[in-house]
Amino acid sequence: MKKRPNILTIAGFDPSNGAGLTADVKTFETLKCYGLSVCTANTVQDDISFISCHWTSIEIMKYQIDMLFKRFEINYVKIGIVENWETLSLLIEKLLELNSGVKIVLDPILKSSSDFEFHASQNLILDSILSKIYLLTPNYNEIQQLYSDKNIEDTINYISSRTNLYLKGGHHLDELGKDVLFTVEGKQYSLNPKFKNCSEKHGSGCVLSSAITGYLALGFPLLKACYRGKRYTEKFLSSNKSLLGFHSKK
């Protein structure tokens, strides 16, 4: 039997299980990876409403990360919501301390789909974070908030000079569903939507970033992992007409 790669998700808990760490673990399991998790926040929400967010202390999260890295081989980590950029920086430092070669995929969640705001950008801390992660996966709304002093083109160039950038097109007004991968080598790849019967889903951004992380852990190069991750997410989006999607690789 082929050994499944371990993937750690550091993300929030959503009681509806549509988003956050449970959505990530569902995705990893479907892709035949083994999901480990550290909870950044306990939320009061469902698929349509977000009431409150109760953050986990950095000490507990670092203790959990220590335990997991001592027990398991972890080369890929996906990060979702965190309390602030300072906490995120500390978490990344801990991960690199335990495995200097770990690849980190960061989904910079600044606001929930129900408009609950988590934290504002702080450029100096964000600058230091970008050079330590492997891939950043914002949508069009999020990327415009990351560097409010820059226009979107300058922001894309700035970020992609420091790390790989996967820009999600689900909120793009002109080319809805068209994603673009910008690599640190200066290359650009468009990933166009294929499925026609997709509908809005709670947690779709979490699923996409965790699917990309899963394919990376399975040994696919970045572009192919992004392509397959997008197709996986489109199947998730087309699985039914409700806000909570079903996971299936087939």
Image: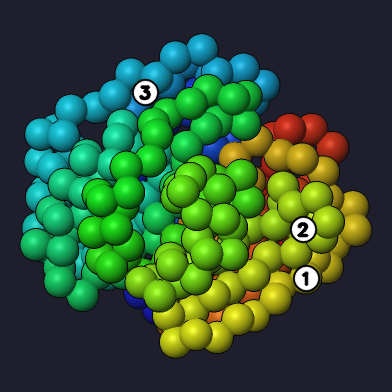
Which structural element holds mark 1? loop
Could you tell me if the residues under marks 3 and 2 are in contact, i.e. CB atoms within 8 Å? no
User: Crowdedness of circle 3 by 10 Å Cα count: few (<14), some, many (20+)?
Assistant: some
In the picture of the structure, the residue carrying the numbered disc 3 is 42
Rendering quarter of residue 49: top right
Q: Tell which residue pokes out farthest to the right in this image.
A: 196
Q: Residue, x 75% and y 64% (percent of image)?
A: 178
Quick check: 249 left or right of 215? right
The image's mark for residue 14 is none
Could you tell me if the residues under marks 2 and 1 are in contact, i.e. CB atoms within 8 Å? yes
Which structural element holds mark 2? loop
**Residue type, label 2:** Gly
Rendering quarter of residue 8: bottom left
In the picture of the structure, the residue carrying the numbered disc 2 is 177
Give above or below for 13 relative to 148.
above
From mark 3 to mark 1, how far is it between C-alphas?
35 Å
**Residue type, label 1:** Asn
Residue 152 position, x and y percent, is: 59, 57
Quick check: 129 left or right of 147? left
Asked which colour scheme the image uses, the reply is rainbow
Give above or below for 205 relative to 231.
above
Q: Residue, x 67% and y 21% (percent of image)?
A: 48
In the picture of the structure, the residue carrying the numbered disc 1 is 192
**Viewer-nearest residue: 131 or 124:** 124
Quick check: 94 left or right of 26? left
Which structural element holds mark 3? strand
**Viewer-nearest residue: 68 or 161:** 161
